[in-house]
Structures are given as C-alpha cells and as structure tokens.
Amino acid sequence: MCRWLAYAGDPIFLDALIFQPENSLVSQSLAAQESHSPTNGDGFGIGWYGAKPEPGLFRDVLPAWNDANLHSVSEQIRSGLFFAHVRASTGTPTSRTNCHPFRHGRHLFMHNGRIGGFDRVRRALTLSLDPDLFAQGEGNTDSEVFFYLALGHGLVHDPKRAFAATVAQVEAALAEAGVDEPLLMTAAVSDGSAIYALRYASHGPAPSLYLGSANDAPDSVLILSEPLDNAHGAWTEVPAGHFLTARDGDISIEPFAPALPLAAE
C-alpha cells in the first residue's frame, strides 16, 4: 500500500520532509516500515498551495527515489500546506493520471488502501458519479473514484459527512456484489485552509496513520502514514475509525461511522 504525508504550518521547503528525515517519504518509498508493501515505487506526487487559491501539482511514474526532478523541485518549493504521496499500485496501471494527489478546483485528495473487490463494483460506483464529475476523471483507480464520489456527496461543504456517505455507499455496493474483501483506507483532503483525514477499515486492521509536527516548525501539523524518525514520543497514532480535522493549528479527532444521506436530502 502507499505512503503519504500532509503538512500545514509555517512555510517550509518540501524536501525538509520528503528527503531529509531519517525515515523520509523517499526512504519509505524504498523500505516502508509499517506497510504490507515495503516498496512504493509505482510513481509519486506532490500537491502544494502557494500564491493562488488552486494548488500546484507535480506527479510522475518514476520511483520517488529515482527522480532527480522531484529532488530539485522539492528543494525550491516552499509552502505552508502541501501533500506528498508515494504509490504502490493495488492492480491499476502505473501512469501519471493514477498517481496521487488528485486535484479538483481548490481541493487536493490522496489515499492509501483499497476498495476490496473493486473490479466487481467499479462499474456500479462509476456510473453513480455526477455526470460533470464523471467527465473529469482521468485515471482508473479506486482512489479517484472515491474522491469523485465524495465530491458528489458534498465534500466541498462538509468533508466528514461526505466521507461518511461515500464509505457507506462503497460498503453497500460491496455487499450487493457479494464481496467479502474489506474497504481499507487512510485518506486526506484539503481546500488550502484545512486538512481533513480519515483512518478506517470496514473489517480487519486499518492502514497506519500518525499525527505529529515537523522538527523545523514546532507549531505545525503533520499527518502521515508512518513516523519520520524513532522519536516515539513525538508521534501519536490516530485511532482506526476516526476522522481528523486540522485548521489554524487546532486539531480535533472524532469517531467516524459510515452514514448514507437521508432520502430527503
């Protein structure tokens, strides 16, 4: 499975987290410590907010450890809110359009995990997308489908509620198709002012997720798949089945449960 991190705080250069730490994201792309897939070499992506409301995006298919452009770009980009992701495919092709983060307007989204039996529910979920969102899809991953489903459930206005409705819809589709494989996920979304993150599994253990801060920015918020070093007291594990909101330095972690929207809504 993939590895990712999301940062919010005083502007820092991206390489401070992607390359420099002991267990940097690039190190995790070669030898992840808390993943079923220790190697995450099926592409990478960074998304960052700068002077414009819409985020910048840079994705490619080379392994993160083997892309000199990623190193050069991350040394020069300075941002107060950014996402970074290294990919381990769960079956879909290695292509730029399948690399995270995904972007829609002001929003960035990235994901780790899988919709179990996605090949058996892909058609039903894709056809349920809002037609305008369907037309904007570029790749063929379960991650992108989840993102567009969440947008259709009001992600722009109420991220937690949209995630709850999307998880419920996916689980209903899996049940209808007779799929026993679980939905496993961590995910993060941002509109440039806040970060929202989820750790969840329909059954079985959920992928790992932690909360901490960057060494060079002690007031920052760092949400990530696994710690960047062995300073155990610096990292807090986000409990499975919880939803995290980070805004202006304030952090809340709340229980999460799937919930389809009421018919009247």
Image (spheres, grey):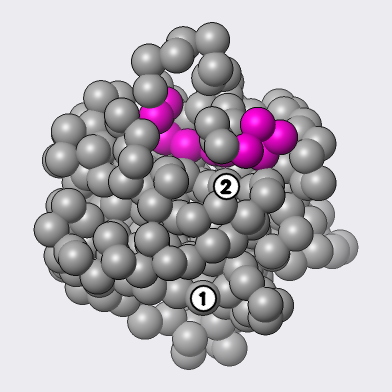
Horizontal side of 246 relative to 35 (left or right) equals right
Horizontal side of 182 relative to 54 (left or right) equals left
Horizontal side of 233 relative to 34 (left or right) equals right
The kind of residue on which mark 2 rests is Tyr
Q: Secondary structure at mark 1?
A: strand
Q: Which residue is mark 2?
A: 7
Residue 93 lies, in percent from the top left, at 16, 67
Hey, which residue is sitting farthest top in the picture? 233
Residue at (76%, 33%) from the top-left corner?
A: 251
Is 157 located above or below residue 14 in the figure?
Answer: below
Magenta highlight range: 217-228
- For the N terminus, which image quadrant? top left
**Between 97 and 55, which is closer to the camera in this rendering?**
55
Residue 51 lies, in percent from the top left, at 67, 77
Residue 56: which disc?
1
**Looking at the image, can residue 124 be seen?**
no
